[in-house]
Image (spheres, rainbow, N blue to C red):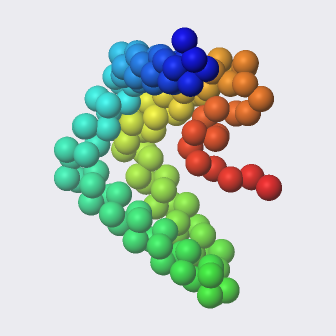
């Protein structure tokens, strides 16, 4: 076999392993819980209304901050809106599930990155560093 053939087969093998990893991740309890809580939050119109209202307050705050016009009261309003949103039990469950999944994915990233000289997840995500 030539070097090119070996490299092509190795590339195919790595892609197959990556697909298997992705499939295995979808079977993780953390991922399943994340999907279940996300579905509940997305299906609840009351929660979606709260999310839209929070996003509006956040957008207004960001615009005021960019214009140099944000006040402490604006920040308090944003924090209160966020606390109100996060206090909804279904949203709280979703955020906890999201955090658990992110922690599990970080653990997997460390395992994948261990033999490499780069942080796999960071480079795969397309993030740039100086």
Quarter of the view holding residue 103: top right
Query: Camera-side residue: 79 or 96?
Result: 96
Decide if residue 69 is on the left or right side of residue 18.
right
Residue at the farthest top position: 1
At x 19% / y 44%, what residue is drawn?
A: 43
> Can residue 21 be seen from the camera position used here?
no
**Count of numbered badges drawn on the protein:** 0
At x 27% / y 60%, what residue is drawn?
A: 49
Decide if residue 13 is on the left or right side of residue 3.
left
Decide if residue 98 is on the left or right side of residue 76.
left
Q: Percent from the top left, x then y, of residue 100?
A: 51, 27
Q: Percent from the top left, x then y, of residue 107?
A: 62, 21
Query: Camera-side residue: 102 or 17?
Result: 17
At x 23% / y 53%, what residue is drawn?
A: 46
Which quadrant holds the N terminus?
A: top right
At x 63% / y 50%, what residue is drawn?
A: 127
Is 125 situated above or below 70? above
């Amino acid at each position: 076999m030539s070097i090119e053939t070996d490299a092509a087969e190795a590339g195919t093998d790595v892609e197959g392993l990556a697909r298997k990893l992705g499939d295995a991740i979808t079977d993780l309890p953390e991922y399943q819980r994340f999907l279940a809580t996300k579905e509940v939050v997305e299906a609840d119109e009351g929660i979606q209304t709260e999310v839209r209202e929070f996003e509006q307050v956040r957008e207004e705050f960001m615009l005021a901050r960019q214009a140099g016009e944000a006040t402490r009261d604006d920040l308090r309003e944003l924090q209160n809106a966020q606390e109100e949103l996060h206090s909804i039990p279904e949203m709280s469950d979703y955020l906890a599930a999201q955090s658990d999944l992110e922690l599990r994915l970080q653990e997997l990233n460390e395992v994948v990155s261990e033999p490499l000289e780069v942080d796999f997840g960071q480079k795969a995500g397309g993030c740039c560093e100086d």
